[in-house]
Image: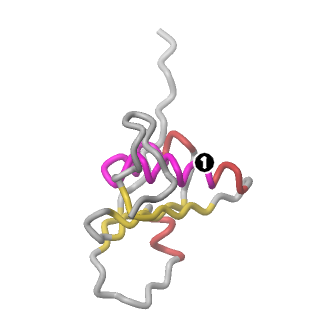
Amino acid sequence: VYHSVLDPRTGLPATGASSATVLHEGDALTAAAAATALMIAGPDDLSPLAGRMGIRYALLIGADGRLYMTPEMHRILDLLDTNLEQVISPVATAEPASSS
């Protein structure tokens, strides 16, 4: 089974995550682009990539079946199956460049 999200590094379907959901207060285009990027990047890069993109609400279902999410998403999410393993990743904010 293949899906439509291709990893530009390989040209093959992304394997970083099974699913990505992003809520964005700005616009749907940003949310869609962020979800695609996060799905390709996978759970290990959720926090730094979401931070660089200004995404506060993100949820990934990893290839391992675990739920990976930002703290903000965790706060608003009401899971029906509480037996799923959850990994909460604080979003890394971009640090301002030094002006030395």
Residue lying at 45% horizontally and 43% vertically, measured from the top left: 49
Question: 91 or 16, which lies in front?
Answer: 16
> Quarter of the image holding residue 60?
bottom left
Relative horizontal placement of residue 78, taking residue 66 as reference (left or right)? right
Local SS, label 1 = helix
Question: What range is drawn magenta here?
Answer: 32-50
- Secondary structure, magenta segment, majority class: helix
Q: Is residue 54 magenta?
A: no
Residue lying at 49% horizontally and 84% vertically, measured from the top left: 78
The residue under label 1 is 33
Residue lying at 36% horizontally and 58% vertically, measured from the top left: 89
Q: Is residue 33 magenta?
A: yes
Q: Is residue 8 shown above or below 1?
A: above
Residue 23: x and y in percent read 61, 63
Residue 42: x and y in percent read 36, 52
Q: Residue furthest right?
A: 27
Of the residues shown, which amino acid type is indicated by label 1? Ala
Q: Is residue 75 shown above or below 55?
A: below
The colour style of the image is secondary structure
Relative horizontal placement of residue 9, taking residue 35 as reference (left or right)? left
